[in-house]
Amino acid sequence: MKFAKIFALPGLFLLVMLFGCKEKNEEWISLFNGKDLTGWKSSEDPTSFYVEDGLIIANGARSHLFYSGDGGEVEFKNFELSVDIMTTHHANSGVYIHTKWQDEGWPSFGYEAQINNSHIGEGDYIELKKTGSLYGIRNVYKAFAKDSVWFTMKVRVDGHQIKIWVDDMLTVDYVEPQNPHRREGSTGGRLSSGTIALQCHDPGSKVFFKNIRLKKLPDISSSEREIPEDNYPKVLDLQFQNFPLIDMVVETDGNFNADSALNVFYQSGINWGFVVDLSEADSSIVDQLLTSHIQSYQDYPVFIGAKISGPVSNTTFSRAEKLDYVIGEVMIDSISKYNDMEKYTDDLVKDRIDLILNTGIDIISNATLLPEELSSQSEDLWTSDRMMKIIEACKANEVAIEINNELKSPGFTFIKLAKEYGCQFVCGKISNKNGRAEMDYFYEMIEKAELNYKDIFIPGYE
């Protein structure tokens, strides 16, 4: 660090005293000299980190590179950290904060800001948490950075608050509760103080780091965020089990407010999929609606989807390749046209199968929904044969099934059959009118149907 010279001029000294100057802890300091690993200490396998062309390269057996500074031990409390990162295909890494030196293993102290644009896991384990996640605490399931392209990860710790940015996108705004919910085997702990560490995850993960800079903040937090109760302990439990919680059916019409939705995302850790409904749109404006929808939300940490009720021509659906997913929903005909409810239900099944087979959708919404007038006959009308026709079509065409938290649909029997047949699911309609996320039915189905994280569909996963 270069220090400014102090001139012994009484007038200048008085001006400095009166109007102040930047304190040491308000200046950016470089943690990497661009030449070698001076000030850093590697655990387990020292050969996993090396410097080449002014870059720190992580490539080799599992190891962690801890910042030790000049004195061999460093403690940072409140700070901003900025790191430029580039990943190779299938690479996994991370930046640890408030951590402490240990000879081997995954760091047991602090929190990890995840780096993973395309890593798919190892063995039977599928890694779903993407770059910009606060690992296991506030997970992000969509990659907002790309392999082989430099991006900047920023982390800010201020009191009980942790923020993470991927370039200019805020992916995490987490306020640690007074008494954080503890999960068995968790590597996270209460915010206190500690050093920075870079992760070399495995021999197949090659990651480049440069411009590692840190700015100390005052020890007394400036954050005005109220320290909350832990209102979503079950979400934390599921996220720690790698279970993705995403509402894929957040419709952006009507009174939708993106900022309010994002506040729920930051508070709860439940991800969103923003959907434009094209079901009744005139074909001449579908392309315009899609373009506007994508442009409106492409800078938000969300999935972007569309909902349709039937085939959409290739011409008017030309923006579909820029969407993360498409949901299909059959428009329900009035039962007044039918005298025979068995025939009515058979036609519903046929329409839903046609939607699955002929539209290229990724998700089917309300797979077993009947008109309200028939709700009392649901169990009789939804025979095993009818349910299996839809389930078989979904499986054959890799179409996921929405579990609608608001409508409590489909029922347990259908979900259990679909699970046993190897179908995947998504969650929908979990945000209530008071701006809180409620997932009681989804939680119930996870438990009763014994759903696991591999049963959940995530758009774009390889």
Image: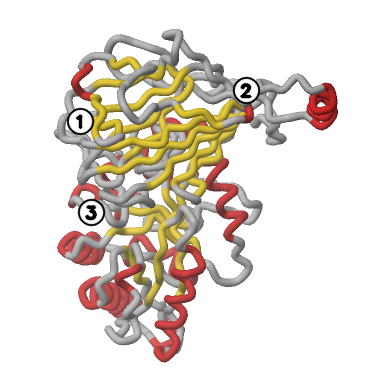
Q: Residue at x 20, y 46 (%)?
A: 89
Residue 265, image x and y in percent? 53, 47
337 relative to 128, above or below: below
Residue ID for mark 2: 178
Residue 232, image x and y in percent? 53, 35
> Hey, which residue is sitting farthest bottom in the picture?
284
In three-dimensional space, the C-alpha distance between marks 1 and 3, rounded to whole angstroms, equals 37 Å
Q: Nearer the viewer, residue 433 or 282?
A: 282
Labels 1, 3: front one: 1
Residue ID for mark 1: 59
Residue ID for mark 3: 423
451 relative to 286, above or below: above
Secondary structure at badge 2 equals: loop
In three-dimensional space, the C-alpha distance between marks 3 and 2, rounded to whole angstroms, equals 40 Å
Disc 2 crowd, CA 10 A, few/some/many (<14, 14-19, 20+): few
The picture quadrant where one finds residue 453 is top left
* Residue 331 visible (yes or no): yes
Q: Earlier in the sequence, mark 1 or mark 2?
A: 1
281 relative to 122, above or below: below
The picture quadrant where one finds residue 284 is bottom left
